[in-house]
């Protein structure tokens, strides 16, 4: 079918239509290192976060080793690391391990790979823009991540490392003498959090401005793919929540270094040091921290939700079931996410009436979440499903999200949470949501958009093997944690078996550790697939998945400026198997039929 879009675009209403005549004379370093091209920045985020995922995973395996084989030498660890203990992990080092595992995986992996890598790469392509609104700010958002990684990494080399947990609660985090891990390493950790916050703020400003102002002609809000809606809502969350955490981090640094008392109560004596002055509130930090960190759960989850919706629709050859309810439910999840932070603090002594309010608001999040689950199932139901790696990972995302969501309802109830708070039931829940669901979404997205990023296809055989091993290892690692939590096993104990009532849980922990080793080993298959396919991957056509989105109308990989002509949008992105278009089972947003109306102006 001959499309009229190119004809219209070449003589039409934009100055970007001539970008295919543009000669790219940038230096190599400005093309690939300090690049302002959103695609290169997205790929930089992708490669950086895949490397950092290995670092965070190594911390996780060290934690699992200690819980399965306490007080034994770790394999591959020379005794010079723990010469005094013969290669055994010390309790102080264990505390640093789970602090840094949570820090790296949340702040340097999940958020940057979703909002940073895929947000950067996809937003201009999917809305028909040549680049981000602020390219230099976009570049800085990537490079501000490295001072954060440097501060986190440097903190490991100070005595004890940062050891107040990834939540960094006072008094441990506020007073130097509180614990072996409360020294200068904790200040470095807080500086790293500040850099992460600045990086994310730069990205969120860019994403909102780009989506609002730079959509192609005809790309109204309700013609945007759900991936773009998810990135837009995520950017709004970041813009409103991050300043709170950044301010709180600066206040905590001031308490530590300048003697202020935002979070340090008067008269407290720690480790026989002099009593403190002032009248701060340790609980204030918890309120400020969770006011950001609960929306952060959705900052990590919403982009994956949007991308999974797009991928399921394409792989099932069906329109997304309930497009507008999906948009409204994502918005509701984001809005409710701001008023439920107190459910992390049910055992802090809050007023029972306030606890009831947080409980009801938390349970209400299950409603828009359930809408999304039923809409995904409705999209799959009756579809012409393509059985490939993208589909497997996308369906795994939905499955893991259901498990994590159901366990979340348990913890929303105050009486239940009082019992299971700070047990392994909590660890199981958030790993199903933030690791199980989110990472399967990431794996699907890498496989799906890899051809557009690099112009080559990834290996299906390696992708399916990676999926199977990861799925088995993930569930073998995290599902038994529900049982550990119900049995009363607490988090953050280096050797819980010192308590007799936990001794019988050792075999289960060993099984979980073997599963974690399997899951960790499987990720090398992903790395082989990602980097190997750059060399031996089959050359990708422009639209290998027969998808409708604007990104598939650009060359693979897209040039500087993205599109050869300004795309014009005539319909939404989910016209699969349309009865109005019988030539083929997809109908790209840029294809105009004779009887179609002229595209409306951008709203």
Image: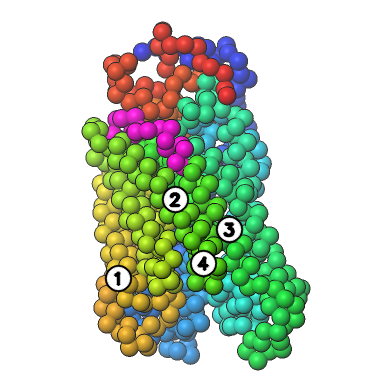
**Quadrant of the image for the N terminus?**
top left
Name the residue rendered at 49%, 37% in the picture.
Answer: 229
87 shown above or below 539 = below
471 shown above or below 463 = below
Residue 541's x, y, as percent? 37, 29
Frontmost residue, 493 versus 41: 493
The answer to whether residue 323 is magenta is yes
Which secondary structure, mark 3?
helix
Q: Nearer the viewer, mark 4 or mark 1?
A: 4
Q: Disc 4 to disc 3, how far (Cα)?
A: 19 Å
The quadrant in which residue 501 appears is bottom left
Which label's residue is closer to the chain start, 1 or 3? 3
Q: Nearer the viewer, mark 4 or mark 3?
A: 4
Q: Is the magenta stretch mostly helix, strand or loop?
A: helix
Q: Disc 4 to disc 1, how far (Cα)?
A: 28 Å
Report the disc number at residue 291. Answer: 3
Q: Badge 1 is on which residue?
A: 483
Which secondary structure, mark 2?
loop
The answer to whether residue 342 is magenta is no
Frontmost residue, 497 versus 365: 365
**Quadrant of the image for the C terminus?**
top right
Tags 4 and 3 in contact by the CB under 8 Å rule? no
Name the residue rendered at 66%, 63% in the picture.
Answer: 248
Q: Badge 2 is on which residue?
A: 365
Which label's residue is closer to the chain start, 1 or 2? 2
Q: Disc 1 to disc 2, how far (Cα)?
A: 25 Å
Which secondary structure, mark 4?
helix
Res 325 visible: yes
Which segment is the magenta one? 313-330
């Amino acid at each position: 079918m001959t499309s009229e879009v190119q004809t219209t675009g070449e003589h039409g209403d934009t100055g970007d239509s001539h970008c295919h005549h543009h000669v790219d004379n940038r230096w190599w370093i400005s093309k690939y290192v300090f690049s302002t091209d959103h695609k290169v920045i997205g790929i930089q985020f992708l490669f950086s976060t895949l490397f950092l995922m290995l670092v965070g995973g190594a911390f996780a395996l060290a934690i699992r080793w200690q819980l399965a084989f306490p007080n034994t030498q770790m394999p591959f660890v020379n005794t010079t690391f723990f010469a005094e203990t013969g290669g055994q992990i010390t309790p102080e080092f264990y505390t640093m391990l789970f602090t840094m595992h949570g820090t790296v995986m949340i702040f340097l992996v999940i958020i940057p790979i979703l909002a940073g890598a895929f947000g950067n790469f996809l937003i201009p392509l999917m809305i028909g823009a040549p680049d981000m609104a602020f390219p230099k700010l976009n570049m800085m958002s990537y490079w501000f991540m490295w001072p954060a990684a440097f501060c986190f990494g440097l903190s490991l080399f100070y005595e004890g490392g940062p050891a107040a947990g990834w939540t960094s609660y006072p008094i441990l985090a506020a007073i130097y003498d509180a614990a072996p891990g409360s020294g200068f390493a904790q200040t470095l950790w807080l500086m790293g959090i500040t850099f992460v916050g600045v990086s994310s703020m730069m990205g969120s400003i860019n994403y909102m401005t780009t989506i609002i102002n730079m959509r192609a002609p005809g790309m109204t809000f309700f013609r945007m793919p759900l991936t773009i809606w998810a990135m837009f809502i995520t950017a709004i969350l970041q813009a409103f929540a991050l300043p709170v955490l950044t301010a709180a981090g600066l206040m905590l640094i001031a308490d530590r270094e300048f003697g202020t008392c935002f979070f340090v109560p008067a008269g407290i004596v720690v480790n026989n040091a002099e009593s403190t002055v002032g009248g701060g509130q340790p609980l204030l930090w918890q309120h400020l921290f969770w006011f950001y960190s609960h929306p952060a759960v959705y900052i990590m989850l919403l982009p994956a939700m949007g991308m999974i919706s797009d991928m399921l629709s394409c792989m099932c050859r069906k329109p997304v079931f309930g497009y507008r309810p999906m948009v409204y439910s994502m918005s509701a999840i984001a809005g409710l996410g701001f008023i439920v932070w107190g459910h992390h603090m049910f055992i802090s002594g809050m007023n029972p009436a306030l606890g009831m309010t947080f409980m009801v608001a938390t349970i209400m999040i299950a409603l828009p979440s359930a809408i999304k689950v039923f809409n995904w199932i409705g999209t799959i139901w009756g579809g012409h499903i393509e059985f490939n790696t993208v589909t497997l990972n996308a369906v795994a995302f939905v499955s893991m999200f259901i498990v994590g969501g159901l366990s979340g309802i348990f913890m929303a109830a105050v009486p239940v949470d009082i019992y299971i708070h700070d047990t392994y039931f909590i660890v199981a829940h958030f790993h199903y949501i933030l690791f199980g669901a989110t990472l399967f979404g990431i794996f699907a997205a890498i496989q799906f958009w890899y051809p557009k990023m690099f112009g080559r296809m990834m290996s299906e055989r390696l992708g399916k093997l990676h999926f199977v091993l990861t799925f088995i290892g993930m569930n073998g690692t995290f599902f038994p944690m529900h049982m550990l939590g119900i049995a009363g096993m607490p988090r953050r104990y280096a050797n819980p078996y010192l308590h007799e009532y936990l001794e019988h849980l050792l075999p289960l922990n060993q099984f979980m550790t073997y599963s974690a080793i399997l899951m960790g080993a499987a990720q090398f298959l992903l790395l082989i697939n990602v980097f190997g396919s750059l060399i031996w991957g089959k050359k990708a056509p422009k639209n290998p998945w027969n998808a409708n989105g604007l990104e598939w109308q650009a060359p693979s990989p897209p040039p500087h400026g993205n599109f050869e002509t300004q795309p014009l949008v005539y319909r939404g992105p989910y016209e699969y198997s349309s009865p109005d278009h019988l030539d083929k089972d997809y109908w790209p947003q840029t294809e105009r039929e004779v009887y179609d109306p002229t595209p409306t102006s951008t709203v």
